[in-house]
Each structure stands twice: as C-alpha cells, then as structure tokens.
Amino acid sequence: MIIIMKPNASQEAIAKITRTIQDSDLQVHLSKGHQVTIIGVVGDKSRLQGKNLEIADGVDKIVAVTESYKLANKKFHPDQSVIPVGTTTIGPDSLTIMAGPCAVENQEQMMETAFAVKKAGATFLRGGAYKPRTSPYSFQGLEETGLRYMKEAREATGLNVICEVTSQHAIESAVKYVDMLQIGARNMQNFELLKEAGKSGMPVLLKRGLSATIDEWLNAAEYIMSEGNEQVVLCERGIRTYETATRNTLDISAVPVLRSRTHLPVIVDPSHATGVRAYVAPLARAAVAAGADGLMIEVHPNPACALSDGPQSLTFDQFQELAGELRPYADLAGRKLG
Ligand code: PEP
Ligand code: MN
C-alpha cells in the first residue's frame, strides 16, 4: 500500500508514520515528489491493523497497491527515475545511446568501435564478453580478457561501458571493469542471478525475456530492487511471435505501457528485435517517437566478419548516419543526445 501525505504535511508527521511502519517490521519506501510525499509500504500490511494511519496527522489517503511489484511500481514513485551510471545519467532529459558489437572479439575491434560510436554521439560502449549463444558450439565470448578490452576502450574514450553477465562469477569479474551490468533476455527470470545483480549495487540493464509479459518483466526488476539496488533500466528487445520476417517482434507499445506502470527508464534495442540491419533505423526512430529514454544498437567495424549477430550490426558509417537522423527526433522529444 501507499500512504499519500497532504501537500503541507510536516517532516515530523512523515517521520512519525515512517516509525510506526518500521516498528511493525515493514519496509518503508519514501518518495518526495514536487507536490507531495508518498510513503510506500512493503510487506504484510495486516501488521498495521489498528494503527489508524488513515486518520494520522498529515495523511491525505491510503491506496492499496494490488500489483505484486512494489518498488518498481509507479504508484510508489510517481516521478520518472533518473539512473546515474558512470559519467552520465539515464532518464527523461536525455536520449542515451549504447552502441557496440554483439561480442567483444579483440582489442582493436573494441578500440576502433569505441572511437567511432563516441564520435556519432553514443555515451555507452556495449559488448558481450559472456555470450549466451543458442548453440554451445558458437563463440562463447572472451570473458575476463574481453572485459579488459572494454575497460581499455573506456579509459581511452571516456565512454561508459556495459556488458552482459550470465553467472555470479561473471558479475564478480564485471564489477571490476564496467559501469553497468546487463541481464540478457534469456536470463530475465534467472532469479538467483537477479538477486546477485541486486547485491552488486551496480546499475543494471534488464532486458525483456523472449516470451515475458510486462508484468513478469516488472517482477524481475523487483527482484533486483528488493536487494536494495534501485538502479534498474528496462530494455525492450522484441518478443517471440508467429512472425518470421524478423528475428523477434518489437513490442513498441511496451514503451507507453511501462511508462504508465513504472518509474524506471526504458530503452529499446531495435537490433535484436529485428535481426535485420535495414530495419534498425526505422524502429530506432519509432522508439524515440514512442518516448524511449534510449537505444541499444549493435555496431561492428566489419559486420560481414562478426563472430555473432553480423546481419543486424551497422557499419560505422551507417551508425553515424542513424545518429544524425535521430537528432531532430531527440530535439522534438525534448531530449539531449550525446
Ligand atoms: C545482446 O545484447 O547481445 C543479447 C544477447 O541480447 P538479448 O539478451 O536481448 O538477446
Ligand atoms: Mn547480439
């Protein structure tokens, strides 16, 4: 449930209610908005029976939160969250662009790509050092060596870096090298991994599962947040449908749906959503128009030779062109790009 305080509620009244909740062994989540303060309560609210909070000093009303996700819920935090990551923030004022290869392949590839995507306006370099591939015989990633290449590219360019983690061991390594952890689609409901990502205290990009509903996705975010880590960003990357013309089907409606249900930022990955290079730009434009806070785009120095996801990767020139095309869209949406 949430307790909505009156606009003129005193600090003392807020503190008194907070104490009553904590004394009942419940968790408090305080959200101080422009107008009002909202006190979120997590746990078994029957413990508050008989406390008469609805008539307590400063209380406007009490609203039940029926959804199973609480900390991720917009009712707990009506203002959109801004997530600080490395040297930047992800949120409503900017259009964050994360770009780079599907997999980290070698040092030169990462360095070249970092400079190219930075020049075009990206603020994040992406790259997979642990690759959850469909086949066990496909390239599985360079692991810690790959993370080292990412860190070197970060030091050379000032870009923030993000890498997918697939195990607790990968998290332990990644925290030493990157600014943000990525939980991939295949692990969206790997609850132990979500808890470990939560405990790491690092910002987490949580991709939507291949067949996950929005409700399941928000509950996955709740797993991370319930470990005390509220630095979560959601990434729509396409879902499985009967359509085979594209690798997945981009659920563009997820952007406004999430906006109405959660305060967490939402970015869109048109590369994995389509699997086809030619469709990346139109869907990137659509994502910005729909209100996304950012984009994740695969870029490779030579997509024809990429060890994974070449057909959906843009060349440096194509990425530069797309970033240029996106600028007027970002302006219209009131967001700063780069
Ligand atoms: C990726 O970003 O490289 C990736 C594997 O994406 P997804 O988890 O969305 O398939
Ligand atoms: Mn990929």
Image (tube, rainbow, N blue to C red):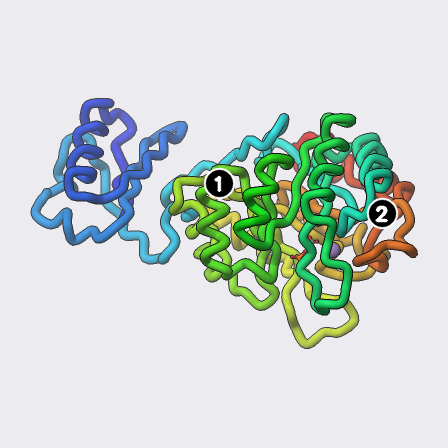
Residue 167 visible from this viewpoint = yes
- 138 over 300 or under it: above or below: below
Relative side of 25 to 337, left or right? left
Q: What residue is rendered at 72% in x and 74% in y?
A: 243
**Mark identifier at residue 296:** none
Q: Give the farthest residue toward the top.
A: 11
Q: Residues within 10 Å of mark 1 (few under 14, many from 20)?
A: some
Asked if residue 170 lies left or right of residue 5, the reply is right
Measured from the top left, where is residue 245 in percent x and y? 79, 71
* Foreground residue among 202 and 60: 202
- Give the quadrant of residue 59: top left
Q: Is residue 193 left or right of residue 299?
A: left
Using the image, determine if residue 304 lies above or below residue 2.
below
Residue drawn at the location 82% of the way across and 60% of the way down: 276
Residue 145, percent from left and from top: 72, 42
* Amino acid type indicated by mark 1: Ser
Give the label on residue 200, or none.
1
Q: Quadrant of the C terminus?
A: top right
Q: Residues within 10 Å of mark 2 (few under 14, many from 20)?
A: many
Q: Helix or strand or loop: what does disc 2 sit on?
A: loop
Residue 322: quadrant of the picture: top right
Q: Tell me the residue at 60%/39% (across/down).
A: 180
Q: Which residue is mark 2?
A: 300
Secondary structure under tag 1 reads helix
Residue drawn where x is 46% and y is 58% of the image: 191
Residue type pointed to by label 2? His
